[in-house]
Image (tube, helix red, strand yellow):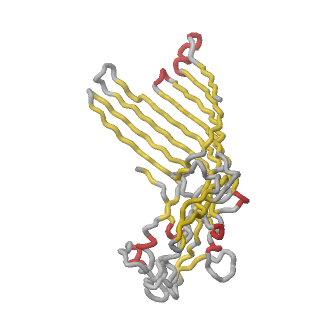
Amino acid sequence: ISGGWVISQGPFMGDFGRHLGTLKLRASYGVTGNQGLTGDKEISDFAYLGLYGTSNYGGNPGIAPSNFANPNLKWESTHEFDAGLDWYPFGGRLTILADYYHRLTSDLLVNRPIPAITGFSTYWDNIGNVLNRGFELGLSSINFQSPGRDGFSWTTDFNITFNHNEVTALFQNQPFGDGDNFRPISRVAVGDPIGEFYVLHFLGVDPQTGDAMYKDVNGDGEITSDDRVNAGNPQPKYFGGMRNTFSWKGLSLGTFLEFSQGAKVFNLMRIFADDGGYNYDNKFTYALNRWQQPGDITNEPLASFDGTSGAREISDRFIEYGSYLR
């Protein structure tokens, strides 16, 4: 469902009308469904059925379950509301496009982890809702334009997007990890954005021993997976870009800026190149600042080939700022 209203300049508005230009207001609402693809994974047409396939056991042919049944499986749906304006003031020399969107995806299709005693580790299920809402702004301007086809011209295009992502519901409100059970880095939890980093909090290096120190969140005297904390959003607060184009006599020159602000990134290479010497790998220059004797104040644990320094624990020590201007 969509609609729009146009406010145009009229002769009765004089010079003010020519500067005002044309203003278009628009709004839309719609619902779309998805049953075949989520992320980079394709969902079988028969994912809801309990299926069997051929399987050998002890050299004898037979059959075995090949798909765990879920008779309640259904389509996920996205409800989206959009409102925006298109404005062309100053005789069309400036174009302003602004949009607000509110997009709620419910009954999200996810390959949900289940107890391995079932014979399967995951199965397709509708596990919750995800909200995306934000604002987009686009500006285009004709800064200079000489008469004639071969004259000099200069135009600018700018865009910026603000997006808020939040998981609003999950199956029994239970969070789940990123699928890497050996070394989980992020998780999905109600109230957080998708992929929020969820790791140990690095406190620094013990000046006396050179061992890495981590926050004991639950106070049980041990550092375990139960001590993990939210450590940053991998999604930017806003991103966008700007392009300038200069033209003259059939020649053109373009310059651009691209930016992203607020995202965190997990530097996976540091697990191997900033691990205190545990792996047979080249090391980053961080290792030059490693702890070497009692009393050293540093954030680099001692070189420990057996890994007892704790330098390889997955923590926010490996999480870095991902903002950039290119």
Determine the residue located farthest toward the right in the rendered image: 172
Determine the residue located farthest toward the top in the rendered image: 11
36 or 143: which is nearer to us? 36
Relative to 307, is 106 above or below? above
3 or 326: which is nearer to us? 3
Locate residue 34, reporting x and y percent: 60, 43
181 or 154: which is nearer to us? 181
Would you identify the image quadrant in which residue 8 lies?
top right
The answer to whether residue 295 of the structure is visible from this angle is yes
Locate residue 42, reporting x and y percent: 53, 50
Q: In which quadrant will I find the N terminus?
A: top right
Residue at (41, 80) in percent of width and height: 277
Residue at (68, 57) in percent of width and height: 190
Residue at (48, 83) in percent of width and height: 307
Locate residue 100, reporting x and y percent: 61, 38
Would you identify the image quadrant in which residue 142 lies?
top left
**How many labels sit on residues?**
0
Relative to 176, is 209 above or below? below
Locate residue 322, reporting x and y percent: 48, 58
68 or 132: which is nearer to us? 68
Residue 56 is left or right of residue 193, and the answer is: left
Relative to 99, is 48 above or below? below
Relative to 92, is 190 above or below? below
Would you identify the image quadrant in which residue 97 lies?
top right
The answer to whether residue 193 of the structure is visible from this angle is no
